Image: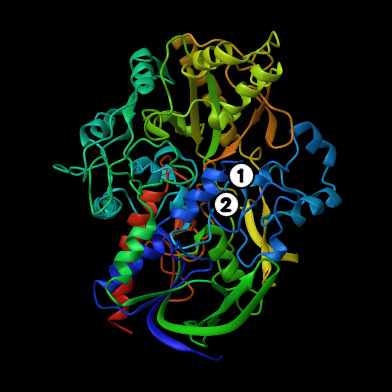
Amino acid sequence: MADSTHYDVVIVGAGIAGAIMAKELAAKGTRVLILESGPRDRDDRKSFHDTYLTAMAKLPNTPYPPYWHGTDPAHEPDKEAVPRPMTAMTFAWPGLTEFKKWNGSQAKFDAFNKQSYLTYTNTTELPFLSTYERLAGGTTWHWLGTALRFTESDFRMRSRYGQLVDWPITLPDLYDDYASAEETIGVSADVGDQRALEPYLGAQFPKGYEYPMKRIPMSVSDKLLGDTIQGLQFDGQDLEMTCTPQGRNSEYRDGRPACQGNSSCIPICPIQAKYDATFTLREAESTNLVTTLTSAVVTDLEVGPNGLITGVNFLHYSGDTGHYRAQRKTVSGKIVILAAHAIESVKILLMSNGGQGIANGSGQLGCNLMDHLCYLGYGLTNTQGFPYRGPRSGSGIESLRDGPFRKHRSAWRVDVGNVGWEWADDDPTTSTHDFISGQNKSRLNPNGEKLFGRALAERLNTANTRMLRLCYLVEQEPQHSNRVTLSKRLVDGLGLPRPEINYSVTGSEYTLRGIVAAQQTTDLIFDKIGANRYFPNHPQNYSKFIDESGFPGIEFTLDGKDYKTNLYGAGHIAGTYRMGDNARVSVVDANSRCWEHKNLYLLGSGTFPTIATGNPTLTIAALTLRASRSVLNDLRHL
């Protein structure tokens, strides 16, 4: 291939895993090339932020290219060089009643797939609900900032509870790497808050540990909720509110300001008080040992007769939507690292070897696709909590992340929102429209009043200052049938196959029992705090079932009871190249090294054998730091 260049290490992907790995390697004198499929921020996030401010739809993808302008079709992935999953595509998915009428119709799925980067088999039950970005900095541009450690039980599920699988490592194995990850990201928290959870979650820190920065204080609404639910129990365990460890500054640090409470953490922090991987990427590049090449889409990996990766083929493109020009190039490295996310890394491996794939001797590549399934409970409290001041979420209920109940149902953590019903019901937009037009989509205007002026402002203030939203991040059981493959018919703007997804939830009773427990806990909490019952048509009082386009839902029967619920994605895409202690059942080892190709590493949450009960970013960073030592050791012997 033309323009071949050799490096010590070639990294594919400039998100948090790629950036941290590059920084660690460069610190030891390693020459690194990063290939990033998308663009990078050219003006200190100004253009991204301006796009967000002027857009009608404030979605996680909104600030970032390629842009969606709210027109049909929602997306044209066949014309984009780096298309990605779009939040807008969820709007095109039918409600449950209409979806049942599809009855597996290939024509219906074809129509949806045409405008969706992620395509679906006709046995799919609902779309994969999470998105990601393809640009320098990756999805840390719009992560929430939650920086929780996993519990010891998260790593030992099979051993402790007879469910799921064990990881090939334990929590103490990651103590030092978690500490380094918290230092790299800059986590604000109080270790005393976390130690108070030890009766429920076990020890998570060695003696004497302190976080890099003091915690960000609880909001008014968080304090009110925490005080009110004291004494409540579910499954025999207390409901305890604590401040959440956050990857955002509580004080000026490393050239970045303290959080100013803009409440736009998703999709963009305008001042970079919240960490994103561009910060670490710049640190890596400042060593003059790390080169980042953007607009470089990797197509496949070349494999030598000894099983080592001998080349990384990519398309270096330029141009605009529908009019791209691309030059095929190859680079090589002593070690190759895929850090392109749980779906894109799989896509590269499946496109290799002439489309026959590599690294799949275990049959696990692309399988066990997982997310935290988000169940939302929301209602109005009797007391004003004044949301929208501070981060989108700063506290949570973590005391039910572990316990004997995991023998028969999945666990969850509760993210307590600080933006009212924005996620749950697109408020304050929905209620404002209701009170102006006399409609009742929000269920706050049952008499169909039409208001304006002072009366409108007072009614909206009364409602919006009392809105509360709880998000249960439900642990999803890994299932081999939930998988990523390549579409045989649909391609992107560079002619590369788009991912094809087969995905369902109702095949796991273990997961469904976790969802039901989330509904029951919502009832318990809202009864205690005296929330008004606005959704009488739903068996659970505080989370209406929305049966219309844009609200994917499931129905199931459990223990003789029928349930319907809408589900949402957490953005926690995991499981597709799981780690394990032998090559028969996993794709990578405990150091994230591929079993079949000894100079290939796979980073990111794709290595997770289970989704666990904490948000994944901190663990991605910790596992990357662990892998960096293995890479450096391998380089000494190559």
What is the spatial separation of the Cα atoms under label 2 and label 1, in whole angstroms?
A: 12 Å
Camera-near label (2 vs 1) is: 1
Q: In the rendering, which numbered label is found on residue 357?
A: none
Report crowding for label 1: few under 14, some 14 to 19, many 20 or more residues within 10 A (C-alpha).
Answer: many
Tell me which amino acid carries mark 1. Answer: Leu
> Mark 2 or mark 1, which has the lower sequence index?
1
Tell me which amino acid carries mark 2. Answer: Leu
Contact (Cβ within 8 Å) of mark 2 with mark 1: no
Q: In the rendering, which numbered label is found on residue 369?
A: 2
The picture places residue 337, in percent across and down from the top left corner, at: 43, 71
The picture places residue 303, in percent across and down from the top left corner, at: 53, 83
Quarter of the image containing the N terminus? bottom right
Q: Is residue 74 above or below residue 320?
A: above
The picture places residue 89, in percent across and down from the top left corner, at: 68, 47
Secondary element under disc 1, as helix, strand or loop, is loop
Quarter of the image containing the C terminus? bottom left
Secondary element under disc 2, as helix, strand or loop, is loop
Report crowding for label 2: few under 14, some 14 to 19, many 20 or more residues within 10 A (C-alpha).
Answer: many
Query: What residue is shown at x 43% (from left), y 65% (from top)?
Result: 14
Q: Quadrant of residue 416?
A: top left
**Is residue 116 visible in the rendered structure shown here?**
yes
Is residue 358 or residue 296 the one in the foreground?
296
Q: In the rendering, which numbered label is found on residue 129?
A: 1
The picture places residue 635, in percent across and down from the top left corner, at: 31, 79
Q: Is residue 341 above or below residue 285?
A: above
Q: Quadrant of residue 78?
A: bottom right
Is residue 504 or residue 450 the one in the foreground?
450
